[in-house]
Image: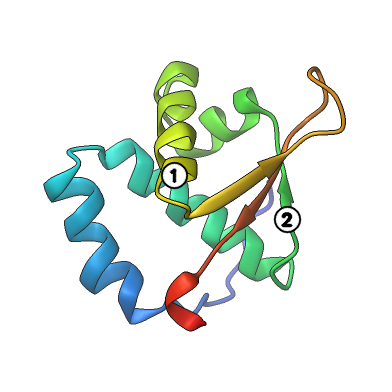
């Protein structure tokens, strides 16, 4: 992935609330890092779903595939992302949810 010099705006909620809840309360820093990566990618794509394989997501975040898998499950459970795939072996699309904006 090419480096960009674009600044990505980050909602205050992501720093002030989610960081404390996911890292401090849930003790899942990998979930927070995964969310930040997906958030940035979604923002760059004008909030379209991010289609990425587990391996590519792990490589992009520097986490193991198993850590990313657990992180994605946690994010889905917290309703911070919604994941869909055309079939079981297709690359999943992750839609970043921002319920605090509703």
Q: Nearer the viewer, residue 61 or 75?
A: 75
Residue 73 point in image, percent of width and height: 46, 32
The vertical placement of 47 against 32, above or below, is below
Quarter location, residue 20: bottom left
| Residue receiving disc 1 | 75
Residue 50 point in image, percent of width and height: 70, 51
Residue drawn at point x = 74 percent, y = 66 percent: 45
| Residue receiving disc 2 | 49
Q: In the figure, is residue 11 to the left or right of 24?
A: right
Residue drawn at point x = 12 percent, y = 49 percent: 24
Marks 1 & 2, CB-CB < 8 Å contact: no
CA gap, disc 1 and disc 2: 15 Å
Q: In the figure, is residue 94 to the left or right of 67?
A: right
Nearer the observer: mark 1 or 2; the answer is: 1
Which SS class for mark 1?
helix
Residue 75 point in image, percent of width and height: 44, 44
Residue drawn at point x = 64 percent, y = 62 percent: 42
Q: Nearer the viewer, residue 95 or 37?
A: 95
Quarter location, residue 95: bottom right
Q: Earlier in the sequence, mark 1 or mark 2?
A: 2
Neighbours of disc 1 within 10 Å: few (<14), some (14-19), many (20+):
many
Q: How many numbered marks have been drawn onto this rendered protein structure?
A: 2
The vertical placement of 102 against 37, above or below, is below
Residue drawn at point x = 17 percent, y = 38 percent: 27
Which SS class for mark 2?
loop
């Amino acid at each position: 992935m090419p480096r960009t010099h674009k600044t990505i705006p980050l909602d205050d909620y992501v720093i002030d609330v989610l960081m404390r809840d996911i890292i401090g309360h849930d003790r899942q820093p990998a979930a927070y890092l995964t969310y930040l990566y997906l958030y940035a990618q979604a923002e760059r794509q004008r909030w379209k779903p991010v289609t990425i394989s587990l391996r590519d997501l792990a490589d992009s975040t520097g986490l193991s595939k198993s850590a990313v898998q657990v992180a994605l499950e946690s994010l889905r459970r917290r309703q911070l992302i919604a994941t869909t795939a055309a079939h079981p072996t297709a690359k999943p699309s992750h839609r970043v949810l921002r319920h605090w904006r509703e």
